[in-house]
Image (tube, grey):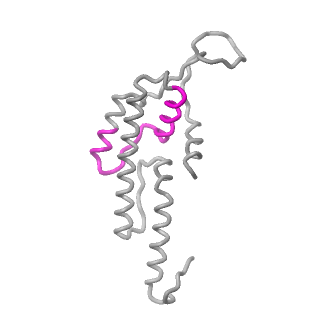
């Protein structure tokens, strides 16, 4: 799954839209006829709390939405007029993302260097997993081939794939 597919999944998230007029029914599409209400978590104070908690904890903390990064990108790209303090929100979400990706890289490095066989990925979003997926899969495949080559009874110099 690539980032555009994850973003597509994020587009299924419900967003509240409030019309700027009142009519029974209208079949016309027009501009500036409604406004988007940002999700409750898309607030500077809440995002600052999340950022500080993420920086303080060694493990991944729960995020406000499984698509926090994608929703922020979509809403700020297409409806920034409707979101108060849009630039601050963009910066805070980027800080949260950077902190989580740095943790993910450190975790992956530790996982590989300690020759672990499994990992627990609590509180990661699909986009975060997608970001590290290729690296982890390649690393695990190499580890498997190296381990199977060192097993007694395996053919010398030959890789065995099951």
State the image coordinates of residue 10 (x, y, percent, origin top left).
Answer: 55, 39
Considering the image in quadrants, where does the C terminus appear?
bottom right
Q: Residue at x 43, y 49 (%)?
A: 124
Q: Residue at x 55, y 47 (%)?
A: 3
User: Does residue 141 lie above or below 84 as drawn?
Assistant: below
> Residue 148's spot in the image, x, y percent?
47, 80
Question: Is residue 25 depicted above or below 149 in this figure?
Answer: above
Q: How many marks?
A: 0
Q: Looking at the picture, how far across and down is residue 152, in whole percent?
A: 44, 88
Q: Quadrant of residue 47?
A: top left
Locate residue 50, reporting x and y percent: 34, 37
Q: Would residue 60 be counted in the magenta stretch?
A: yes
Q: Is residue 102 left or right of residue 147?
A: left
Depicted 84 relative to depicted 1: above or below: above
Left of 160 or right of it: where is 91? Answer: left
- Image quadrant where residue 29 sits: top right
* Location of residue 112 with respect to 56 vertically, above or below: below
Q: Nearer the viewer, residue 51 or 151?
A: 51
Q: Residue extending furthest left?
A: 56
Magenta residues, as a range?
A: 51-79
Residue drawn 46% across the image and 68% down it? 140
For residue 54, which quarter of the picture?
top left
- By secondary structure, the bulk of the magenta-drawn segment is best described as helix
Q: Any magenta on residue 134?
A: no
Which residue is drawn at the image coordinates 33% and 28% (left, top)? 45
């Amino acid at each position: 799954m690539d980032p555009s597919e994850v973003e597509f999944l994020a587009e299924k998230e419900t967003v509240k839209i409030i019309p700027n007029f009142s009519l029974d029914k209208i079949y016309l599409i027009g501009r500036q006829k409604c406004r988007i209400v940002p999700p409750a978590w898309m607030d500077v104070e809440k995002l600052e709390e999340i950022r500080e908690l993420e920086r303080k904890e060694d493990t991944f903390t729960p995020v406000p939405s499984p698509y926090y990064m994608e929703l922020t990108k979509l809403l700020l790209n297409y409806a920034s007029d409707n979101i108060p303090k849009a630039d601050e929100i963009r910066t805070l979400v980027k800080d949260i993302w950077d902190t989580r990706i740095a943790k993910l890289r450190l975790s992956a490095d530790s996982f590989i260097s300690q020759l672990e066989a499994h990992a627990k990925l609590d509180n990661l979003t699909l986009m975060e997993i997608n970001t590290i997926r290729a690296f982890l899969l390649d690393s695990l495949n190499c580890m498997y081939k190296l381990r199977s080559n060192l097993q007694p009874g395996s053919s010398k110099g030959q890789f065995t794939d099951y």
